[in-house]
């Protein structure tokens, strides 16, 4: 067999695949492991969305329903995305030039690097952060400049700290709010400053807005496109996975700068064949739902958030209630060498899997993340086992 490419050697296993392997290893030993590791909603996709998928799949009048999603595009879906942005954020989008459908936002996040990065170019990536930001650069044979997120700045980056020589080669600047894994949230002023910075340094901001609708306590997350001049320098990645419990459906979008959208669409035309047309039709239904038809899930996540925060606080772990995402980002308790050691402790002593902060880069060391996307009884049992294990440590 030929030798694998250098990029594959550098790539390694995906973070959550490695966590899954550890869980399977424990289960093979006959040990029940309660996972709180992956952000995959356990709540059902709202019925109107499912019913539209069934209708669209069985609609014999639509002879194109099983054909390539890219060769037989469904204009209604990008139009629905534009209507959602108009209604939710007051942002006007041309659905023909400023919206591109994605097979989930993850693939678009990976592929935007192919649109701009050549060997030697730089992407500025926040850390701790979603691993795919770095992966896109790696697969493009480009470089990544890690921009640490400072807890003293509410896990926001100090853009002015980026060295001048880095900015001279940088093309992409990644942002993500509400933030995974730190749960940090920002206001529109933050985005306005980021847009001004991008204009000054000829950068394209890539904003991952996957959790933009998962918010609590009266907070509403802004879109970066609400900042003045944002469409000149920004593309925003959105997903139906989180708000509508559609992770397995694989549908999302990218919106904003028309040139970035065009380039991303070109890459996709050469790599994939689009989203299954009935899924696009179901997504149109999702984006048109009344808030009451899907926001009921937020109350469930809020209750789970409160349970988790209370349990961790009772164990002496200082953690505040997040205003966004369905995660808890908490400091590793004293007495443990680091996040990997603590995650291993919980796996072996509590039989609970959490995500070590180091999995999101060195800047995540000293923290761990747990997900609230598990049934109530599962979550409560896991929290009880964590509390018991910590008290006996």
Image: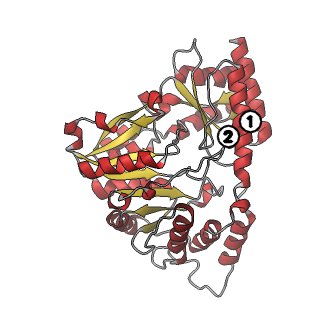
Residue 286 vertical position relative to residue 76 in the rendered view, above or below: above
Residue 274 x/y as whole percent: 48, 69
Residue appearing at x 68%, y 23% in the figure: 313
Residue to which mark 2 is pinned: 372
Q: Is residue 211 left or right of residue 353?
A: left
Task: Look at the numbered disc 1 and give the secondary structure of its residue.
Answer: helix
Foreground: 148 or 156?
156
Q: Is residue 43 left or right of residue 133?
A: right
**Which label sits on residue 197?**
none
Residue 147 vertical position relative to residue 275 in the rendered view, above or below: above
Please report contact status of discs 1 and 2: CB closer than 8 Å, yes or no. yes
CA neighbours of label 2 inside 10 A, class few (<14), some (14 to 19), many (20+): many
Residue 25 x/y as whole percent: 63, 31
Residue 291 vertical position relative to residue 31 in the rendered view, above or below: below
- Coloring scheme used: secondary structure
Q: Is residue 340 left or right of residue 391?
A: left
Residue 288 vertical position relative to residue 305 in the rendered view, above or below: below
Foreground: 348 or 192?
192
Distance of label 1 from label 2 (alpha carbons): 7 Å
Q: Is residue 190 left or right of residue 385?
A: left
Residue 1 x/y as whole percent: 35, 46
Residue 22: in sight, yes or no?
A: yes
Task: Look at the numbered disc 2 and give the secondary structure of its residue.
Answer: loop
Residue lying at the far right of the rendered structure: 377
Residue 32: in sight, yes or no?
A: no
Residue appearing at x 55%, y 50% in the figure: 221
Residue appearing at x 63%, y 42% in the figure: 326
Residue lying at the far bottom of the rendered structure: 61
Residue to which mark 1 is pinned: 379
């Amino acid at each position: 067999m030929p030798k694998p490419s250098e990029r594959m050697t550098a790539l390694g296993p995906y973070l959550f695949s490695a966590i899954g392997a550890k869980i399977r290893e424990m289960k093979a030993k006959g040990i029940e492991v309660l996972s709180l590791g992956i952000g995959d909603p356990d709540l059902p996709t709202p019925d109107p969305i499912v019913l539209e998928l069934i209708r669209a799949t069985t609609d014999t009048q639509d002879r194109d329903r099983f054909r390539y999603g890219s060769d037989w595009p469904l204009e209604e879906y990008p139009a629905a995305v534009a209507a959602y942005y108009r209604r939710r954020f007051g942002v006007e989008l041309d659905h023909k030039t400023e919206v591109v459908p994605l097979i989930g936002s993850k693939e678009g996040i990976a592929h935007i690097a192919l649109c701009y990065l050549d060997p030697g170019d730089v992407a500025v990536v926040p850390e701790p952060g979603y691993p795919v930001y770095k992966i896109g650069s790696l697969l493009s044979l480009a470089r990544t400049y890690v921009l640490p997120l400072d807890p003293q700045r509410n896990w926001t980056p100090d853009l002015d700290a980026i060295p001048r020589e880095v900015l001279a080669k940088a093309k992409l600047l990644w942002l993500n709010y509400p933030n995974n894994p730190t749960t940090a949230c920002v206001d529109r002023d933050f985005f306005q400053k980021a847009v001004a910075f991008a204009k000054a340094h000829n950068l394209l901001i890539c904003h991952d807005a996957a959790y933009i609708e998962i918010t609590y306590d009266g907070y509403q997350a802004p879109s970066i496109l609400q900042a003045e001049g944002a469409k000149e320098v920004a593309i925003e990645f959105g997903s139906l996975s989180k708000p509508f419990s559609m992770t397995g459906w694989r549908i999302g979008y990218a919106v904003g700068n028309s040139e970035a959208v065009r380039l991303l669409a070109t890459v996709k035309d050469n790599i994939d064949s689009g989203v299954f047309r009935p899924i696009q039709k179901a997504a149109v239904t999702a984006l048109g739902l009344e808030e009451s038809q899907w926001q009921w899930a937020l109350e469930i996540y809020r209750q789970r958030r409160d349970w988790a925060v209370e349990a961790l606080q009772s164990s002496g772990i200082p953690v505040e209630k997040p205003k966004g995402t369905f995660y808890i980002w908490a400091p590793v308790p004293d007495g443990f060498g680091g996040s990997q050691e603590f995650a291993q402790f919980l796996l072996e002593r509590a039989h609970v899997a959490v995500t070590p902060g180091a999995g999101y880069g060195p800047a995540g060391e000293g923290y761990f993340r747990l997900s609230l996307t598990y049934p109530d009884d599962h979550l409560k049992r896991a929290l009880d086992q964590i509390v018991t294990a910590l008290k006996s440590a």
